[in-house]
Amino acid sequence: MQTKIKILLALIVMSITASSCDDYLDLRPQDGIIREEFWKTKEDVRAAVIGIYSSMLNSPPGVGDLPLSKYLFMYGELRGDMVSPGTNVTEDERDIMNTNILASNSLTSWAAFYRTINYCNTVIDLAPDVINEDPTLTQEQLNKYLSEALAVRGYLYFTLARTFRDVPLKLNASLSDQDNFQLPKNTQAEIFEQVIKDLKQAEEYGVETYGDQASNNGRITKDAINAILTDVYLWTGNYQEALTAADKVVNSGKYSLIQASNNTWFNRVFAVGNSTESIFEFQYTVQNKGPFYTMFLQRPEFIASATVLEDVFGIDYGDAENKDIRGERASLVPGTNQIYKYVGLNNDVRKELESADTHWFVYRYADVLLMKAEALAELGQGEEAVAIIDEIRASRNAIEFTAKTVDVTNKFDIIDYILEERAREFAYEGKRWYDVLRNARKNNYERLQILIDMAMVNAPPDQQQSIVNKLKDPNSHYLPINTYELYSNKALVQNPFYK
Amino acid sequence: MKRVITLPRLWRLTLLLVVLFAFQNCAQDKLTETTDETLNITEYLKENDDYSMFLEILNVTNYASFMNTYGTYTLFVPNNEAVKAYLQNVGASSVKDVPLADLQNMAKLHILDQKINTTDFTDGKIATPSLYGQFLITGATNKNGTSSITVNKDANIVQPNVELGNGIIHVIDHVLRVADKTLAQSIEENPSLSLFTEALKATGWYEKLNHPLVGEEATNLENYQSVLAQTNAVFEEAGFKTLDDLKARYSHLKDPMNPADSLNLFVSYRVMTRLQYMADMAVTPALETKAPLEIISSKLSKDTLLLNEEVFNGVLEKGIVVDRPNSDVTASNGVLHLVKKNFAIKKRLPAPVYFDLCDQPEFRKLTSIFRTTTGGRQDLGKTDFTDITWDGTGVITYYKDPARGGTVGYGWNGDVVEIYRFRDGTVQNIAFKTPVIIKGKYKVWVSYRTNASKTGLVKMFFNGKELSRQFNVQEYGNVDSKVDERVLESQGYKRYTQPFTNRFNCRLLGVIDVETTGRHTISFQSQASFSNQTWLDVVEFRPIDMDQIYPKLNAGTSGFAPIP
């Protein structure tokens, strides 16, 4: 008996001590999936690609920076001439508007861009191995996914190079803390070159259509790739290539301008989105809203500058009915100068907060048309360029006051007209500063004056001369590298203007 | 066991000591006793060899310890290159050779008693004077494609905004020099200003502009003056080659020293009070001059600063262009600018001003309703206006009715400014900037659309001064044909539109003396807590010697009614 009890006790003791419960030593996260378990099936690849798009809509939980669309708006508009500070503008925003930029300005953080770039890099690095794990993933399907990642990465690098000029080019995924993060800058030309290479590759792999309008406008198609490519070629001065790329979109026959009509045009193109005028949009939904309702309506950080309605869209003081469909209560509200594009439901009614899902418009058909016009103008085909402008003006009911009779042999005249038309067409779509900068810097800053003239429109009178003199230095056209980045990446060298 | 416990006492003690010392550690504890390791300004300069010469200057002048005390300072630090160039310029081989007083003044010019970041810089002066008293001016220049921020025009900031424990430093590549010439001397030393100098001397203004400001005096902006000089070439263009030409044209009393003489006024009109750099002029619409009650208006058109460009009675008078590159010359007692065209005080006769309160640029942009045949209403908030301000959080409304119809269609142009709840907290003390009014005496008539319930009396102010009478928004106009218009006028009423309806009324509020030609401010204050609409139409400023009734305004449309 005694021995039996002893043996039993010994057994119990052994079973408790010898059996280990290793759960608490397990370092795998409980609320996520680790890499070794992911990247097994084609569904995983798809999820990762969709993840790239959603990272562009809003920052992931727990990350404090702004949504990408807000950076795109601010980088494209704040230094232009169409936005004024609203009542809730921050100090940093105002400093950028007044060309008073320091490296410590929080808006110069590029983290949101590199975060999505890393998601793209992860797909580009890890997706090709899935084909060995999942036999149902075809090479063709894989290429399509790669095309999306390459194109998004290309667009983001393109935007970084237009904004900061020289930035580090990281083309592989950062997977662990052991990676080298001390990366030097690459020049703007190198980045443009890489972007073109990526986009060409993406086009080869690219998707014609996903089968539904929302995906065609929310995900990268061949047309979106060609739209970005046209833009990049305009920046690098390859006008023939720009024209070819633009023509691919135009000749696809999938896009058309919607004829102006009260309420429906604005509602269809902006409030609803994904129209036949649209090529690539950030697909905000009522569940996942954009930052616009707050920043333009509830706590307005930006309003239209006082001159926009009159100088950009034109006012017919004699006939109120005669108006550019893109101006009053499409881009802005007269009087209050509220920016309306992202908060309106139609020309009369605003959206409610609950339904404020207006998209961010990255490329629209009109953009490709006007970029084509710019390429044509540069190639000496002025007549065709003016025809494109006229086509757009006719479909938007542009008023006579903003019409210009240009000499079709005078390149600068046509370009100026295109710039004015672009200001009307893409008001508050984050294009203005880049449009003017792109044209100012052509031919070794041949037309710096157009940039300075733009800056003068909104410059506070007592800082105007300083602003003009600062902008005479091309280094000042690009934002500084944020102090934090300089601190954490010792290989970076600050833009000399901000030293 | 027992042996250990009963170890001899000596052994036990030794063991205890050994144990004690064995676990002792001789290294000192490193405790941080400060919460912040940011250096103070002087300490920072000591750490950097490139600033050693300026540090020596601070040491010699005894400012080194001062710059190490706690506070919020801004220090402009010239690097060694800059100090060497300065020494060479003053002909000294080392810092010790420079007279101490000069060094002290120079050092004081580099110190501001407040923390100023480069983002606070404008095209003009830094609001805080230097310790020396003189103001520093900032700006930006572009040399060979590289832009930099400048201080006092020729010192470039090479390293801005170094945040330190007791302030901020900006490293500059030129030593800032104390302006030691007075305005008069600066003008005289410029040979192209010889005729202007002669005019200054002939009118006694040379002495007035030759008084240097030192010490306390220099920190008060009121003691400075700003001069708008013009070159001989500009004089010649206007037909003046010698002082005699000027005297012949302007000196009507033949005594230029007399302040009432027109030549004296010609000069005193070019001397502005206070320190007005270009950047200050660009944001000051009316500049006070030394000519009694005469002002110069200024405005910025793109990057050109225009003086006296105004619309008088619908006619645009072209402005005088300021020669920007040659202006902003700092003197010890002010600043000197050059203009590109001759100008003088213009004698103007008082002219009536019919100020339709709806004529605001912001209202004009409401093209779908502004003075259209159908009309409409639109609310605008305080931040939307450039020329209207008020206290309170409410909005005001542009209100247009079809001509001679609706509620307000009988007003001039058929529109009114509507204030719903003209009272404290909503809309109160609403102020309008008037069009240009030429100096003189005027009668002020206010017309409004009557609203007989829940409104009351309104006071009006001109440039903050209350007018003698109030008007009652509840009071109807008098249309009784038996009452003669002149009788009404004598009682301070008139039928201001044609055709007139009793729903509108017009009240004489008093006589004002407009002392300077320019834009002024009128404001209205409700005397009760109105909870209904107040509709304001027109404010008429008619010179006192003018007919106060005719011409009448058109009801519902623009322009004037034919005089019967």
Image (spheres, coloured by chain):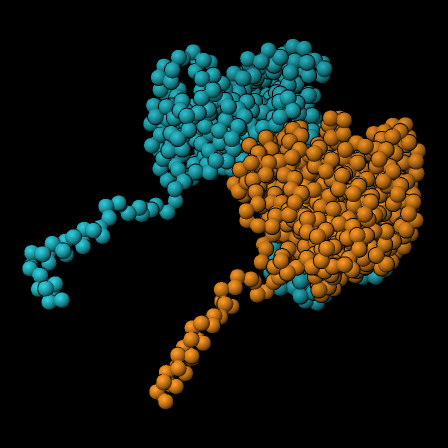
Chain colours: A orange, B cyan
* Left or right: residue B38 compared with residue A436: left
Tell me which residue sits at (76%, 35%) in the image.
A235
Q: Is residue A397 above or below residue A479?
A: below
Circle count? 0
* Left or right: residue A21 compared with residue B123: left
Q: In the image, residue B239 lies at what x, y percent?
A: 72, 14
Q: Residue furthest bottom?
A: A1
Q: Is residue A38 above or below residue A106?
A: below
Q: Say which quadrant the N terminus of chain A sits in.
A: bottom left
Tell me which residue sits at (57%, 42%) in the image.
A180
Quadrant of the rendered image containing residue A7? bottom left
* Left or right: residue A221 compared with residue B208: right
Is residue A417 something one can see in this rendering?
A: no
Q: In the image, residue A76 lies at what x, y percent?
A: 71, 43
**Observer-nearest residue: A278 or A266?**
A278
Quadrant of the rendered image containing residue A197? top right
**Observer-nearest residue: B308 or A45?**
A45
Q: In the image, residue B445 lies at what x, y percent?
A: 71, 49
Quadrant of the rendered image containing residue B335? top right
Q: In the image, residue B356 lies at what x, y percent?
A: 75, 48
Q: Say which quadrant the C terminus of chain A sits in.
A: top right
Is residue A383 something one can see in this rendering?
A: yes
Tell me which residue sits at (54%, 47%) in the image.
A178
* Left or right: residue A104 compared with residue B342: left
Tell me which residue sits at (35%, 87%) in the image.
A2
